[in-house]
Amino acid sequence: MLFNLHTHTHFSDGSSAPEEYLKEAIRQGFSVLGFSDHSPVPFDNNFALREERMEEYINTVRKLSPCPTPNPSPVDEGSKWWGCQILLGLEIDYIPGITVPIETYRKTNHFDYFIGSVHLVKNVNHSNLWFIDGPDISIYDSGLRDFFHRDIRLAVSSYYHQINQMIITQKPDIIGHLDKIKMYNRNRYFLEDENWYVQLIEETLDLIRENQCVVEVNTRGLYKKRSDSLFPGPDILRKIKAMKIPITLCSDAHKPSELSLGFEEARKLLTGIGFKSLSVITHEGWREVSL
């Protein structure tokens, strides 16, 4: 069963209209395609969905959803698409005290699921936000210097504590690219087997299990060559397997051509660790599918 729940269109920082992603999904034989553009944030940026386009985003994706089940016959002769369920989601960029709570969006009943992610890290002693993502490593380094005085333990701890707060207060369905904080670290500031870092991971995984979230296995770092491993990496995935936390496999696509990039390599790694299934949401709810 081929699917992807992490997809960005031109409504946020993706390249193309939703219809173009659906065309490619159908060409590849997808059973489920979930759209998850970045939720609005209350400051100028070039990555998030704008509030005034929210209704257009919802209506555009919903118009691509004529089929109630995977791989059905056409609903009627006028149906343009079939054979692929289309789901509507949001990737919530969680910043405490700044972004809109997930519950606000959940109450509208417009969305099928929510991915909770942290891209901008808040330091309680500083008004600026540390941007840990994007194509420019210098922004990561300058933020660490200017907002955290190069204290990598404080910076990384702030990242994971923000994720923890998101899990507890927002309860997203999916936790996006859990250890993305490592992307521009590249073993320059910390090692992932250091005790303090492992303790942060374990604390977050306990909360994920307690709040029954699904962990996204995100391939984007690999195929964009910004990371030497998946988000999360193999050591964390082994802990997730031991803790019986469900996982889903996503490409974090920003172009139609990226919908399934890295999936083959990821599946080999996951089966090697011992995973036997993935979680996917459909119009009937969450289900497990074999790897």
Image: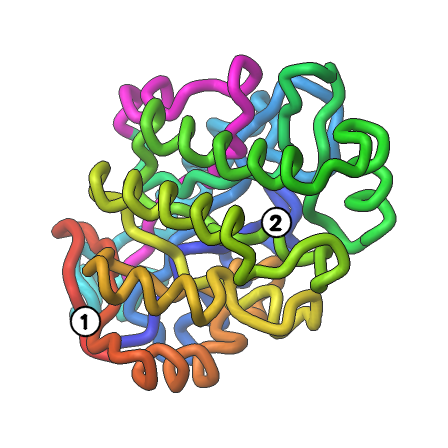
Q: Which range is magenta?
A: 85-109
On the picture, is 82 further left or further right than 162?
A: left
10 Å neighbourhood of mark 2: few (<14), some, or many (≥20)? many
Camera sees residue 56: no
Q: Amino acid at mark 2?
A: Ile
Q: Residue at x 49, y 55 (%)?
A: 7
N-term mark: 1 or 2 = 2
The mark found on residue 289 in the picture is 1
Q: Secondary structure at mark 2?
A: helix
10 Å neighbourhood of mark 1: few (<14), some, or many (≥20)? few
Q: Residue at x 73, y 15 (%)?
A: 127
- x and y percent of residue 124 in the render? 63, 16
Q: Is residue 89 magenta?
A: yes
Q: Mark 2 highlights which residue? A: 181
In the image, 87 versus 231, the foreground residue is 231
- x and y percent of residue 290 in the render? 19, 77
- x and y percent of residue 156 in the render? 61, 41
Image depth: mark 1 or mark 2 in front: 2
